[in-house]
Amino acid sequence: MSVRSELALISEWVRPGSRALDLGCGEGLLLRYLRDTRDVIGYGLEIDPENIRGCVEKGIPVIQTDLDEGLKDFDPASFDYVVMTQTLQAVRYPEHLLDEMLRVGREGIVTFSNLGHWRSRMRLALGGRMPVSGDPGWDWYNSPNIHLCTVRDFETLCDAMGIRILERAFIDNAHRKRARAQIFPNLLGEVALYRFELA
């Protein structure tokens, strides 16, 4: 099964045979990959009915829910990992959801588009237009993203919340890992991946 490198990188961070909860799981691609390659028992949370249908077709257990309401239906330490790929910027209260992730899971994994990337900076500086990250076809006024951030913003938030970063990686929008982005992540990393726990 072919999988984009963002998901392959995440799978390297997940222990075989563990339990994972995927927030905003889309059509369940990550959970299917983890199930098939790492023997992970996974569950997804998703709000979009079409994506839920995709999960069901793949045999992925999924619950329809709004992440802005938190994870109140889950007991503490229910999962080994709570994962959120390209969803952090779309929730209303990111800091609350990070708290919830580490309440119900031992570790958290998030990915997000880095607004600090040099192309975003150039678009704003030279074009005078708000950069739009994520899927093409969105403008600043109709994008699902409401809390765009940079690598530095995320790491500052983790520090303020007492979250210890265990691993991080940076890739481009074509899902390729580039050495320069690992050295200058805030400037050259287009997509950021983090694994973390409570300090």
Image (cartoon, grey):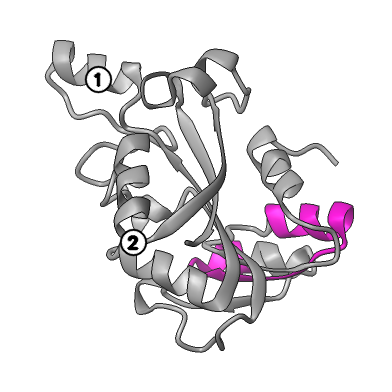
Tell me which segment is drawn in magenta. Answer: 30-52
Residue 38 magenta-highlighted:
yes
Image position of 160 with respect to 81: above or below: above
Q: Please identify the quadrant where the N terminus is shown.
A: top right
Question: In the structure shown, which secondary structural element does the residue marked by tag 1 occupy?
Answer: helix
Within-10-Å neighbours for mark 1: few <14, some 14–19, many 20+? some
| Along the viewing direction, whichever of 169 and 73 lies nearer the viewer | 169
Question: Residue placed farthest to the front in the image?
Answer: 199
x and y percentages locating residue 95 in the rendered image = 32, 63
Residue closest to the eye, 39 or 181: 181
Q: Which residue is mark 2?
A: 161
Which is more toward the observer, 184 or 198?
Answer: 198
Q: Position of residue 25 (x, y in %)?
A: 58, 61
Q: Is residue 106 left or right of residue 93?
A: right
Please tell me which residue is depicted at 30% across the width and 33% down the height of the picture: 132
Badge 2 density bin: few <14, some 14–19, many ≥20, Cα 10 Å: some
Q: What amino acid is found at the position of numbered circle 1 in the picture? A: Arg
